[in-house]
Amino acid sequence: MFVDSHCHINFEGLGDRLPQVIKNMRSHSVTHALCVSVDLESLPSVLAVAEAYDNVYASVGVHPDHEDAQEPSVAELVELAEHPKVVAIGETGLDYYRLEGRTIADMEWQRERFRTHIRAAHATGKPLIIHTRSSSEDTLRIMAEERAGGASGPGGVMHCFTEPWAIAEQALAQNFYISLSGIVTFKSATEVQDVARRVPLERLLIETDSPYLAPVPYRGKPNEPAYVSYVGRFIAQQREMPDAALAAATTANFFRLFKIPAPAGV
C-alpha cells in the first residue's frame, strides 16, 4: 500500500471530483494522502477535504511563489495548526526560478516568510514541508540558522526533490526526509534517479504534487494521488527491490514523520 505525501486535491480539476479521486486511490493501492496548503486564502478548502475524508490530512502554510498572498505571522500559523487534521507546516521555502528582472537580494521577503514558517514549526512541534527551486544554498543555510533540523528541530521533508545528490546529503544531515515525485520517472531526470537509488530507505517519501507532474505513463496529463503508485514502483525498480517493500517503507516513514497513528499492519 502506498501513501501520497504531497498533493493539492483541493485545486480545480480534483476538488470538483473528490469522490472519484478517492475511489481511484483505493483502486491503485493508495491508502492515504496529505493535502498541502499553498496560501491562507485557500486553506479552508484544504481543511474541508481533510475533514471530509478520514484518510486525508492537511498542512498550513504559504508557498514562496505566492507573493501577493496574505502574509502569515508565527502566531497565525500556530493557531491554524491546532486543527486536528493539520499535521505539518508548509509548504514553505524559497523559489528563485522566476526572478522576473529582480535579483536574489530582492527576495528577502521570501526568506523572512520561510523563517516565519520554521519558527511556527518549532512552536507547534509539527514538521516542515519545504519547497526549494533554484535556491538550495539559501534554503539549506536558513534551515541551519533557524535550527529546522537536528535533535531539537521540528524536522520535515524536502518535497518534490529535484536537486543533485550533494544537496540531498546536506538535507539528510539536517535530519530531513527526501520526497520524490513523478519527475523521477522522466527519462531526462538522471540526477533525481541517482538520488532515488541513494537516499536511505528510512528517509524516503513519495508524492504526486498533483495535479502537477504526472509520472510516466501519464506524463503531460492531470495528476492525482492514485498515480503515486507509479512513482513508488519506478523507484523500487531503480533500487532493485520489491514494490511491496518500497511501499511499506515509504508508508511507515509517512506516519512516523507526520506523527500520525499508523493503521494496523504498518
Image: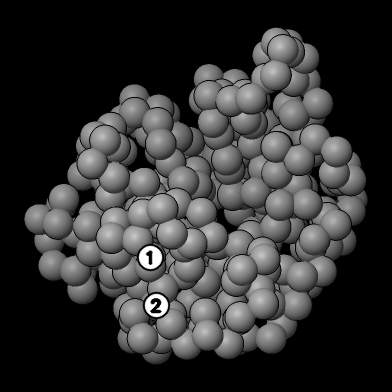
Rendering coords of residue 105 (x, y %) = 73, 11
Q: Secondary structure at mark 2?
A: strand
Q: Which residue is mark 2?
A: 30
Task: Identify the residue shown where x is 72% and y is 68%.
Answer: 46
Q: Quadrant of residue 249?
A: bottom left
Task: Identify the residue shown where x is 70% and y is 19%.
Answer: 100
The reply, left or right, for residue 90 in relation to residue 42 is left
Rendering coords of residue 72 (x, y %) = 86, 45
Q: Which residue is mark 1?
A: 228
Rendering coords of residue 126 (x, y %) = 65, 57
The reply, left or right, for residue 25 in relation to residue 70 is left
Query: Which amino acid is tagged 2?
Result: Val
Q: Quadrant of residue 56?
A: bottom right
Rendering coords of residue 87 (x, y %) = 64, 65
Query: Which amino acid is tagged 1?
Result: Val
Q: Secondary structure at mark 1?
A: helix
Task: Identify the residue shown where x is 26% and y is 35%.
Answer: 188
